[in-house]
Amino acid sequence: MVTLQFVPYTEIETLSSLGRIRKLLNIAKQDKIVLLQGRLKTEEEAELIKTTMEEINKDFRGIELAVINPDKDSTGMQKLRYGFFNMLLGNRQGLTIIGPATVVKQIKKDPTKIELLMEKTRRSRRR
């Protein structure tokens, strides 16, 4: 069974950068796929990857990460609007997907869809 856990931006906005990273990484370490409303700051994404690499062991193989950002493909007035909302509300635009590498083999994205390529879970392999 695959578990998706939605994390609203309001749940992480008051945390420190390290707190955000720990919270999201701890969820992924429970073999859950995190659907985060919005996105982390660029520095936080880099720190999440760094922290993940430091914690890889035989039980935790790392994460797959993808960010869907609506303002990336927008033009003119839309970019201005998204920039204004981000200034007021923080990085709530878009969607961040973080999946444990033991569950998510690869995340592919394009402008119209997201594909999560899954691996069989350890429990399924035993059957």
Image (cartoon, rainbow, N blue to C red):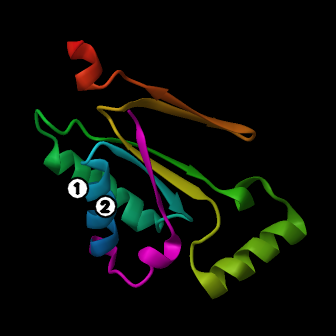
Q: Which segment did they paint magenta? A: 1-18
The image shows residue 69, relative to residue 20, as above or below, that is: above
| Badge 2 density bin: few <14, some 14–19, many ≥20, Cα 10 Å | some
**Quadrant of the snapshot with the C terminus:** top left
The image shows residue 67, relative to residue 21, as above or below, that is: above
Type of the residue with mark 2: Glu
Residue 19 image position (x, y, % from top left): 28, 74
Q: Distance between the residues labelled 2 and 1?
A: 6 Å
Q: Helix, strand or loop at disc 2? A: helix
Q: Helix, strand or loop at disc 1? A: helix
Horizontal arrangement in the rendering, residue 57 relative to residue 110 (left or right) = left
Type of the residue with mark 1: Thr
Residue identified by numbered label 1? 51
**Quadrant of the snapshot with the N terminus:** top left
Residue positioned most to the front: 127
Q: In which quarter of the image is residue 47?
A: bottom left
| Badge 1 density bin: few <14, some 14–19, many ≥20, Cα 10 Å | some
Q: Do the residues labelled 2 and 1 touch (CB within 8 Å)?
A: yes
Residue in the picture at 27% in, 72% down: 18
Closest to the observer, 91 or 6: 6
